[in-house]
Image (cartoon, rainbow, N blue to C red):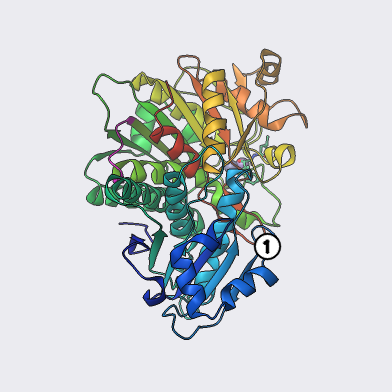
Amino acid sequence: MAYKVLNNIGLIDTSTNALTSLKTGLLVIVVNKDTNKDSAFKDLNKVSKSYISKTIASHLKDSGSSILLPKIDGIEAENIMLVKGLDTSAPMHKWISSYQAIAKKANSINAKDLSIMSGAVSPSGKDELWLIEMIAKTVESNVYIFSETKNKTAKKPSVKKLTIVTTGLKGTDLTKAKAAAKKGYAIGEGVNTAKYLGDLPANHCTPRIIERKVKAMTKDFPKLKVKSFNEKDLEKMGMGSFLSVSRGSAEPARMMVIEYKGGKPSEKPVALVGKGVTFDTGGVSIKPSPAMDEMKWDMCGAATVFGVMSTLARVNANVNVVGVMACAENMCSSTATKPGDVVTSMSGQTIEILNTDAEGRLILADALTYVGKYKPSHVIDMATLTGAVVVALGRHASGVMANDQHLADMIIDAGEESGDRAWQLPLWDEHQSCTKTRYADLANIGGGREAGTIHAAAFLSKFTNDYKWAHIDIAATASHSSPIKAGTGRPVPLLSELLLSKKLK
Ligand code: BES
Ligand code: MN
Ligand code: ZN
């Protein structure tokens, strides 16, 4: 099963295609300082009897502002949108935001396809290839609309095709530009995969349903090898911590391991581990009712793994990566784990579960121990782990904590590059005190109201001594809370950038 929205992303160059005769639902012209000198633009403007240039002069004052024009006689495009381009000094995520708005506009006016003349102006330090990749990624992931569980009122994305209009690109430059568009398209599809799994209601997205979807993906991507573990398998491996979470649910847990080998056989893999709690009631330490529905996005770490692995396969990336999706439903019942219960983790460390709502770390503890067997070069886990990260950082950045500063730096860098930003919190020895208890080697909560995000990471760090590790808390970034209520597909762009740029050494 593929999760792409657009059927096609193409590239045309104005040196061989007259823009006036381009048949398209929406032609977007990003206006910058060079637009006036562009001969394709001059042709359009002439046919419009300078209506376009006059509108730009009178209506497009601020960067990012836009105006939609009605059909103009002599120009085939059904609609034209003029967008004032950003300064080259504007940060990457602002550029991305302006293209998000373009994609959404195209759907809202029911355009069947979208053509974008971006002008060859890119943010400083970036070239036109970056721009093309970004446009493909951003448009693909923002024409997405979730409608699977609507019947009578479904609204499907109208936009089915993107054409990127370039100026003066030929030969190898054109070939490279096409490859950049393809890469962006593949990342956008990965983002949509993660959005889709997140947006599915929890009764349509149980651990077993996710398992089915992951297995189905190998039909599209034979290079992905999937192993799936059921509760018996997890028990055999000694994953008492993981299993304590699914005990209260009629839905059994599953752990999927996806292997992708695109690099040299001798190269150690990067391991990605995702929290996949398909619904988090809190368990016996039950959550309050308001907004509890948002706990269907508690599997977005696992969804990220799914999205990234499919992107790697789609672009034939020359890296070795193993992705683990640790999936369970956290319910409250007579079989559920009770506060004070002690379980034994795969690592041998016993854990007193003082709060059954701190379940993500219990699942990750065993999944992180498991990936050690791959002797990974780096391990990165993604998890909607703490409400505290929303308080600490707000909704724009994911929280990063690591036992290796270079890895943390690379993650933050990849976040800037991809506009999918992350920010580091400390993880010091002093934060470890929280895990002390009289009844087990560790307690699953500690620290009281202080630094909840860091204390969760401190717990995880007890299971990651054997390798370079970073933890990304995505509780604030993986989905938009009420009133928007939608998955974002984050941090698929960050991780795709990190792995595909091959800077992780
Ligand atoms: N899934 C939640 C964290 C969360 C909160 C994600 C809000 C998205 C939005 C996690 O399992 C949880 O419940 N964490 C507790 C930890 C606490 C009991 C130490 C929390 O943050 O309150
Ligand atoms: Mn919880
Ligand atoms: Zn949770």
Q: Quadrant of residue 472?
A: top right
Is 266 rendered above or below residue 285? Answer: above
> Could you tell me residue 474's position as x and y percent?
58, 41
Overall secondary structure of the magenta section:
loop
Q: Percent position (x, y) of residue 43?
A: 45, 72
- Position of the C terminus, as image quadrant, is top left
Which sits in the foreground, 104 or 133?
Answer: 133
Which one is in front, 329 or 41?
41
- Report the amino acid beneath label 1: Pro
What residue did someone put label 1 on? 483
What segment is highlighted magenta in the picture?
A: 314-320
Name above or below for residue 281 compared with residue 352: below
Residue at the spot 52% in from the left edge and 17% down from the top edge:
349
Residue 295 appears in view: no
* Tally of numbered tags: 1
Residue 484 seen in render: yes
Q: Is residue 219 covered in magenta?
A: no
Q: Quadrant of residue 427?
A: top right
The residue at the far bottom in this view is 73
